[in-house]
């Protein structure tokens, strides 16, 4: 498997980005015990553009944890593009990941994360513009769809590929399932 110029083994193990979990200490521990690639906690594009100190601190990475990805989320093209540029310029990650999968009300309810699954044209516009704006490989994390009545991943995966992403992570549930039920 390859993302950009990063070559992985046949069966790589990736650490998922998790809010309040994947800080630098946890990432270093996971790296030590075999993670092929680690991700920071997800970063709000709006907060990053506004230079919110607690958000900017999530960009701290160490060369010892490479390859490392920084995941951003938001609902606005301009702020997502600006955030991706800030991430690339300040942190120099190996990958910039866009979160279209977070199901929590505080994120999805405001139209970001999995909330973007209800506005696919905007989701694709954000993806296309972020890919164009940076030189770092861009990847996406999403879900099967908003609900069982709206399983869009097959078409969406091809559309995201056409936007130029380097890899796609699919959470095998819908937004409506949250973290319950069969994946």
Image: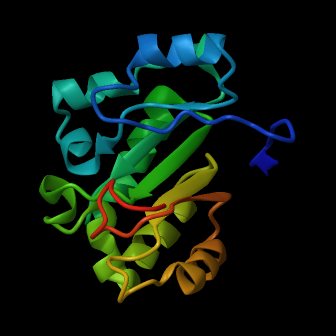
Nearest to the observer: residue 136 or residue 28: 28
- The residue positioned 20% from the left and 69% from the top of the image is 111
Tell me where residue 47 appears, x and y as whole percent.
19, 42
Nearest to the observer: residue 158 or residue 13: 13
- The residue positioned 64% from the left and 31% from the top of the image is 37
Tell me where residue 167 appears, x and y as whole percent.
66, 57
In the picture shown, does residue 140 fall above or below 83? below
The count of marks equals 0
Quadrant hosting residue 10: top right
Quadrant hosting residue 69: top right
In the picture shown, does residue 40 fall above or below 179? above
Q: Is residue 147 left or right of residue 34?
A: left
- The residue positioned 45% from the left and 55% from the top of the image is 98
Look at the image and name its color scheme. rainbow
Q: Is residue 78 left or right of residue 32?
A: left
Tell me where residue 31 appears, x and y as whole percent.
62, 17
């Amino acid at each position: 498997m390859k993302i950009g110029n990063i070559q992985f083994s046949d069966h790589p193990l990736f650490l998922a980005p998790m809010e309040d979990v994947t800080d630098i200490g946890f990432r270093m521990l996971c790296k030590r015990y075999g993670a092929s690639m680690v991700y920071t906690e997800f970063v709000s594009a709006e907060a990053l553009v506004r230079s919110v100190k607690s958000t900017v601190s999530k960009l701290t990475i160490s060369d010892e944890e490479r390859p490392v990805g920084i995941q951003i989320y938001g609902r606005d093209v301009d702020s997502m593009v600006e955030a991706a540029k800030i991430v690339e310029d300040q942190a120099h990650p190996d990958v910039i990941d866009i979160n279209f999968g977070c199901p929590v009300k505080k994120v999805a309810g405001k139209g970001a994360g999995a909330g973007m699954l209800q506005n696919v044209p905007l989701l694709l516009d954000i993806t296309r513009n972020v890919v164009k704006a940076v030189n770092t490989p861009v990847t996406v994390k999403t879900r099967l769809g908003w609900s069982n009545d709206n399983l869009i991943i097959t078409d969406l995966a091809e559309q995201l590929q056409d936007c130029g992403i380097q890899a796609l992570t699919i959470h095998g549930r819908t937004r409506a399932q949250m973290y319950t039920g069969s994946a």
